[in-house]
């Protein structure tokens, strides 16, 4: 009986999350994510696993973190893409919601680690313009099967502005 109530609550929660996501997601961001997904692995993405997280840092600028899950063949890979949007003026015409891909990277895969597709921690350093994104992960230990990591951890990524654009680095001293 308890299991039946849990299942019902789980289905209702999933339905509500999907409905809210579809209404509030900018169509331009979804189109950019679809294009990127096809460039990474055509047809191998688990679309229902894709997650979008929007982090406004000012009235004009928003960072969007998109988490992807791919299963090409007998393996899996988790990717993170970071988009930036800013209201830009082009010939005195405001362009809103122009999403620019600033970084993309593998953040988990079989025999290494799996990421949780929950909302990442996000911080923005106003002085430097750097962004820090922390993902909850589960890492493989020597005793784990390749598809079943067990050690809870975090992956900390820093997106820094540079002369050439943006540079995404992972901290090597993750707890």
Image: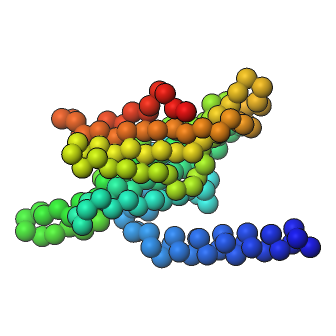
Residue nearest the viewer, comparing 63 with 22: 63
Determine the residue positioned at 57% across, 55% down.
Answer: 118
**43 above or below 95?**
above
Viewport quadrant of the N terminus: bottom right
Rendering quarter of residue 30? bottom left
| Residue at the spot 53% in from the left edge and 74% down from the top edge | 20
In the rendered structure, the answer to whether residue 13 lies left or right of residue 145 reads left
Report the residue that reaches farthest toward the right. 1
Q: Nearer the viewer, residue 60 or 18?
A: 60
The color scheme shown is rainbow
Percent of width and height locating residue 88: 17, 62
Q: On the image, which quarter does residue 56 sit in? A: bottom left
Q: Is residue 2 left or right of residue 32?
A: right
| Left or right: 24 as drawn, with respect to 68 | left
Q: Residue furthest left?
A: 92
Q: Is residue 1 visible?
A: yes
Give the x, y percent position of residue 37: 49, 50
Give the quadrant of the C terminus: top right
Q: Residue 35 location in percent, x, y?
A: 43, 53
The relative height of residue 114 versus residue 121 in the rendered view (above or below) is above
Q: Could you tell me which residue is drawn at 48 percent across and 59 percent down?
A: 52
Task: Tell me if 102 is positioned left or right of 47 in this view.
Answer: left
Residue found at the very far top of the displayed protein: 142
Residue drawn at 61 percent across, 60 percent down: 48
Total labels: the figure holds 0
| Residue 72 appears in the rendering | no
Residue 174 drawn at (x, y percent)? 51, 32
Viewer-side residue, 151 vs 101: 151
């Amino acid at each position: 009986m308890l299991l039946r109530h849990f299942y019902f609550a789980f289905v209702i929660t999933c339905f509500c999350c999907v409905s809210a996501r579809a209404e509030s997601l900018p169509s331009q961001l979804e189109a950019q994510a679809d294009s990127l997904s096809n460039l990474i692995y055509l047809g191998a993405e688990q679309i229902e696993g894709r997650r979008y997280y929007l982090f406004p840092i000012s009235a004009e600028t928003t960072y969007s973190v998109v988490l992807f899950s791919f299963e090409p063949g007998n393996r899996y890979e988790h990717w993170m893409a970071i988009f930036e949007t800013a209201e830009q003026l082009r010939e005195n015409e405001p362009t809103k919601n122009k999403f620019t891909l600033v970084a993309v990277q593998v953040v988990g895969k079989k025999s290494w680690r799996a990421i949780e597709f929950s909302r990442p921690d996000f911080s923005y350093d106003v002085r430097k313009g750097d962004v820090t994104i922390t993902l909850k992960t589960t890492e493989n230990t020597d005793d784990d099967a390749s598809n079943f990591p067990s050690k809870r951890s975090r992956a900390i990524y820093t997106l820094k502005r540079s002369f050439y654009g943006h540079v995404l680095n992972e901290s090597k001293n993750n707890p």
